[in-house]
Image (cartoon, helix red, strand yellow):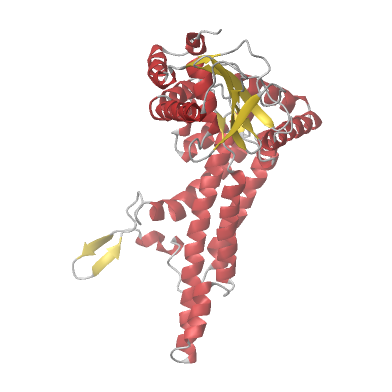
Amino acid sequence: MANPEEASREFSEEIKREIAVCRQPLRDFASNNEDRQGFARSPRLSRRYEISSEQMPVPLLISMAIKLLLGCENLGRTEKLTWEYPFLFRGVQCSISFEKFGLRLYVEERPEGREVDEAGVLEIQKKLSAASRMMEKNLLSLLCKEAVTAGKVTIPNLYYKLRHMYEYFRNLAEAAYAGEGALAQRAEESGKGTLLAGSLTKFMAIRREGLYATLAMVNSYFSLLEHLLVLSLPSTDFDPSKESFADFIGLRLFDKYDRALRGTNAVKVQQLRAKLLKIAETWRNPYSHGGFDKMHHALGFQLEGVGVLPIGLSAIGRHPEFHVFPEKDQGFDELCSIFDEIDEFLTLGPLSASMKWIEAGLDVPLDSNSLSYFRCAASASPDELESYITTMSEQVDLMANMDF
């Protein structure tokens, strides 16, 4: 029988202490690693119980509790089953598994001798649930911190969610500038005043909605770009054993840009950076900070005998809100052109291998083994990279469907 202390031997003393505390609800439990059959896919006599998602909503926490707190061993995957852990409860053989339709608890059926009755089954579930809640409250943050420090992280791929958000606002701005936005239609339906007044009202509505959608588009694109720079780390020389991933995450967008593209096509990288910086200073920053920018252009200075003048008077012609009539061609089209240029650079430039991985919808692991496999495939040939991505995608699908 395995010693539960062995399961925590690789952790820090602080984590070991918390594991000992979280183990307390499981005093009546023990590992049963001599059992290599389990019950889920075995002909052995047992009673099976479905565990509701309300009682144990996160199966991974149960897996962690059984493994870390008791030192139980996973029997491995099989058809429509992700994991199964045999264990003992008051000397009776049991197991818990995660199957296609949820968690299942198995209790040995004994023709004679000691058994676990229905009250005991409920007790098993309550104690496992209590231990998992304690782990979530007291242990997960410590485990997370240690894993991030060691670079053992997987980055969720939100590429399509963020890109669709950006495209939504871009399409919204297109429709607004074409006079097909909600505000323009509302102005038409109101039909108040003279023909000239009505036309002016519609023009102003087009301008306002175009501006609103464009600002949302800019913010969405910057969010998308920052996400891509993080997901693209495997295509850089980033080494999680020497550099802090947490520190990288905490960098500002342009610092992430500089680090991710360090040592690449310097001229093109700097050209695109300058364009992005101009967009940030003109479109994003003022509206992301309550309407204020670093140059205080939103403020007015009081000149006696004249009135209040904007501090950025000389640059007012370049301000997004300066023009009375919609200036789609001057501002919006230029923004779209720059964003398309950056997209092309990411797809075809030094981060192209990562972009192929990202576009496949795969999450990005940063542990040393995963980085090594990816970089080996990326440096071999485009066909080798495509084959590796296809293989990993198929594995993800198998995991999702439990087709083992």
Q: Residue at x 38, y 14 (%)?
A: 17
Quarter residue 153 falls in: top right
Query: In front here: 64 or 41?
Result: 41
Left or right of residue 74: residue 70: left
Q: Residue at x 65, y 42 (%)?
A: 345
Q: Residue at x 62, y 22 (%)?
A: 109
**Spot occupied by residue 102 in the image (x, y as percentages of width and height):** 60, 36
Residue 241 makes an appearance in the image = no
> Could you tell me which quadrant the N terminus lies in?
top right
**Spot occupied by residue 279 in the image (x, y as percentages of width and height):** 49, 52
**Spot occupied by residue 41 in the image (x, y as percentages of width and height):** 71, 25
Quarter residue 235 falls in: top right
Q: Is residue 217 above or below residue 400?
A: below
Q: Is residue 210 above or below residue 193?
A: above
Quarter residue 60 falls in: top right
**Spot occupied by residue 184 in the image (x, y as percentages of width and height):** 51, 77
Residue 132 makes an appearance in the image = yes
